[in-house]
Amino acid sequence: MYSYLGDTSLALFRFLGPALVLQSALLSALSAAPSPPGPQMEAAEQLPTFLGREARRLDAQFLEGITNRAQWEAGRQTRRQQYLEMLGLWPLPERTPLNAVVVGNIEQDALRIEKVHFQSRPGLYVTGNLFLPRQQPAEAKLPGVLYVCGHSGRGRDGNKTAFQHHGQWFASHGYVCLIIDTLQLGEIAAIHHGTYRYNRWWWQARGYTPAGVECWNGIRALDYMQSRPEVDPERLAVTGISGGGAASFWIAAADERVKVAVPVSGMSDLEDYVGGKVVNGHCDCMFLINTFQWPWTQIAALVAPRPLLFANSGHDTIFPMTGNERIRARLERLYGLYTNRTDRLFDIAVTPGGHDDNPELRLMAFRWINRHLKNEEGPVSEPELPKIDGPMLRAFPDTLPADEVNTRIDEVFVPMATNQLPRTTEEYRHWRAGKIKELLRIALRPIAEQRPTSLQLPLDWRKGGAGHLSSEPGLEVSWRLFPAQPERANGPAWLIVLDEGESLDTKPAWLKEVTANDAVLLIATHGAGPLPLVDPPPYYLQRSLPLLGRTLDSCRLANVLAVIRALPDGQRRRSGPWHIAGRRTAGVIAAYAALLDAHLSKVVAVDPPASHREGPIFLNVLRVLDIPEAFGLVAPRSLTLRTDRKELFQATSEIYRVAGGVCKVEPLP
């Protein structure tokens, strides 16, 4: 273990560390012990157990099937593209002019500070301070350090002012250091906490995360540093703590111009984030949308084989030592594919203390960067540095730019699908196949990989019945069958997806197509019927699921498909047709079940939302299509929409006109 600490302190931590880890593990195991599975287990009990198991399963896939460097390198390009896509950065945005402006200087004895701003894309302003040695040898180019800030509110001054001592140290030791504000806590205050604070769950449907903005701002900050004549473009490092530690990972993993990375208290693994509910202690900028269901450490692995020091404090409750040790073991395996001397390229540094920018962490970062950018060994120290008042460091001292898009960047950062509609039947076939393929690739990936169930519903079409089915191990869906009368034995059978607040006890009155004699199979997914969802702020369940490549609504769709696939074979091919229906969000889920299962010949959606911004929320779905186009994928099978917003479903009618089939858009009764 690499550490700047003296022998006594380090020995004390090493002595206490295993006990602390053991105590933490025992407490975690006790708190996460699953309840005995049973048919009446509520969603509030089911989902945490399921999530913890899924987190461990995904984490265990790190380096799965990879035993040598060549195998890892062979997949590097694919992994990088997937990674950027999960940040909302693929294809990479255009590198538009930075329009960088230096608005003023502050002179100190040994260094100079420039107050700068640039635009990482038109109107997306990045404010920062550039720290330079006051005396620089002629024609010499200095190594550069990008410092990305943690969550420290400084109002209009920007959170860069809270971390100015890092810039002062680097500049006084022969570096050029750029400290940039974050999106939320910069001079132009935007939003990191979109989901749990402002209920912007549509971020997940858009494939948007503020982590993507922080990563892109960092990439463009490197562009700016390389444009400076004082900076050696081949010697760049990135570091930061907390949110800045996460951003250090985002940037170093995305941009190989970063030669050295020191993320401090910036990452845990899925077992801690999800299984240990550590996600509750973090904001949205700390997470990408895990579309491809990566083990989380694979993000850090993209930095290899470049020098990486992962620093943390041993009593950091939002970056627990349990996860720290697992990450260390995984990355040592990976770096071991490149060299047996992993201590020279990768190390983990731990100090006593909690979640704080403490001096020991800073000194370890300084020493690591010295070693790998300047080839300097030896101890470092941190003298007392003068503090500059925040207003003096502003890049916009008075008014903010009127053309800024920072405060609405969530609406424009990730490109949405344009969805040019097909014009012929042949175009429709290709369009439909492409849309379904893309949905299964980035919106419904776990469903595409869902293992067929070997279970079959014990249906008695003469007597009816009720029961429960495991759509996946630990996730149960409830159902109830109302039998058909003998004279309707060959008539249609209805699958009805229940919405929130609806009951399994009676046939829904809102579906006028159903007669008293028809067979009706009710499906109560998570959050409906007897499985009410309990997920109070900070919304642990709804925020954890995207870390596993899922959403609550994609789990609901998986519930419905599991029931359909568990129908006895003879019933799936019964002489009468199968129809499916749902109301509100459940109606859209019913339509998605139909477009993924050809046994369903008719869909009825009553009062459906017109956009996935309203729900159901599937990851990245708005990058593929929206609800009117999704309804069109059901064609040429029969579709009935009951809505008082007919004008919002014109695309559905147009698709049906081209594709054929019957599409009725009727007013609500």
Image (tube, rainbow, N blue to C red):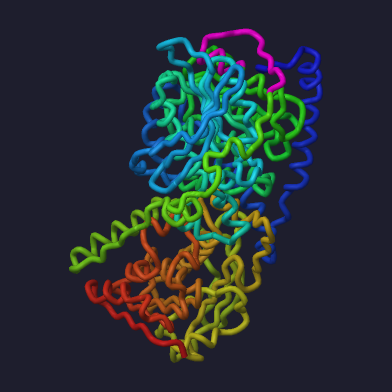
Looking at the picture, does residue 479 appear above or below residue 127? below
Residue 372 is a magenta residue: yes
Is 485 placed left or right of 536 in the picture?
left
Is 435 placed left or right of 167 in the picture?
left
Is 399 placed left or right of 535 in the picture?
left
Q: Nearer the viewer, residue 559 or 599?
A: 559
Q: Quadrant of residue 394?
A: top right
Q: Quadrant of residue 429?
A: bottom left
Magenta stretch, overall SS: loop
Q: Quadrant of the N terminus?
A: top right
The segment highlighted magenta reads 367-385
Residue 261 is a magenta residue: no
Count of numbered circles in the view: 0
Where does the image place residue 333, in percent across and percent down from the top left?
Answer: 54, 23
Q: Quadrant of residue 196?
A: bottom right
Where does the image place residue 134, in percent across and percent down from the top left?
Answer: 54, 17
Instruction: Name the residue: 55% across, 27% down.
Output: 113
Instruction: Name the residue: 42% across, 48% down.
Output: 123
Looking at the picture, does residue 217 appear above or below residue 132? below
Q: Nearer the viewer, residue 385 or 222?
A: 385
Where does the image place residue 556, in percent across and percent down from the top left?
Answer: 53, 64
Residue 307 can be seen in this image: yes
Is 16 placed left or right of 63 in the picture?
right
Residue 576 can be seen in this image: no
Where does the image place residue 142, in percent across and percent down from the top left?
Answer: 47, 16
Q: Nearer the viewer, residue 463 or 317?
A: 317
Q: Nearer the viewer, residue 24 or 627?
A: 627
Instruction: Name the residue: 59% across, 31% down.
Output: 240
Instruction: Name the residue: 51% across, 86% down.
Output: 510
